[in-house]
Amino acid sequence: MPREVRLRTDERIDDDVHLLVRFNDDADVPNALRLALADAHLYRVLPGHAERGALTVSVFLVSGIVEARTLAAGVGQHVFGLATAGRMREAGYEVVATTVYRDGVPAPFAERHADVVVADYPGDLPAYTTELARSVRRQIRERLLPAYEQALRLFDPRYNLSEEA
C-alpha cells in the first residue's frame, strides 16, 4: 500500500495546542524508532529535509485531555501521552502539520495529524531500507535511539484509559 506524506502549509500550530502521541504504538521505543526510520524518506517533502528526509514522531492535534481521551478511545488506543507544541518547540523540535495518505486516500483523522521533527535523517548514514544488513540497521537504531527516546519522554506522563474506567 503506497504511503505519502504531504505538508499542510496553511495550518498554524499554536504553542498551546496539545499533541497526542499514541503510546500503544510508541511504548516500545526501539520499534517506534524502527518504523520512523523506515518512513524517514517520506519526509523529504518538508522544507529543509528534501535531501535525506527526517526522523519524526507522529501526533494528533487535540484541545486537551478530554479530547485526547475521546480520540484515543475512538482509534482503539489505551495508552497515550500529551505535550504542547510549545513544549516541543522549547526543546528544539519542529512541529509541522502533515497529512498521511494511503493509496491516495487521507488516513483517518488526517485533519488532526502532525509530526514532531526529531532530527534530519543523518547524511553520513545509508538510507534505512531492508536491503541493508541487519547489523547496519541495528547500528543506525543504536545511534539514533537516545535522541528519539528523549523526544518521546516529553510526552510523559502516560495516560491509560483502561486504568481510568
Image: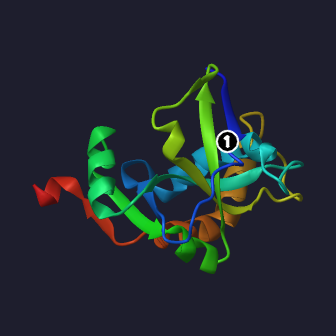
Q: Is residue 29 above or below residue 149?
A: above
Where's the C terminus, which quadrant? bottom left
Q: Is residue 67 left or right of residue 56?
A: left
- According to the picture, the residue beneath numbered tag 1 turns out to be 39
List x then y, in percent, for residue 44. Answer: 80, 45
Pick whichever, 139 or 163, lies toward us. Answer: 163
Residue 149 shown left or right of residue 133 in the figure: left
Q: Determine crowd level at label 1: few under 14, some 14-19, many 20+ residues with C-alpha closer than 10 A.
A: some
Write the residue at 79% across / 49% down.
53
Quarter of the figure with the N terminus:
top right
Q: Is residue 34 above or below residue 139?
A: above
Residue 98: x %, y % from top left: 63, 45
162 sits left or right of 70 in the view: left
Residue at image position (53%, 56%) is: 30
Question: Could you say where residue 37 lies in the image, as x and y percent from the top left?
Answer: 67, 48
Q: Which residue in the rendered view is the most extreme toward the bottom? A: 90
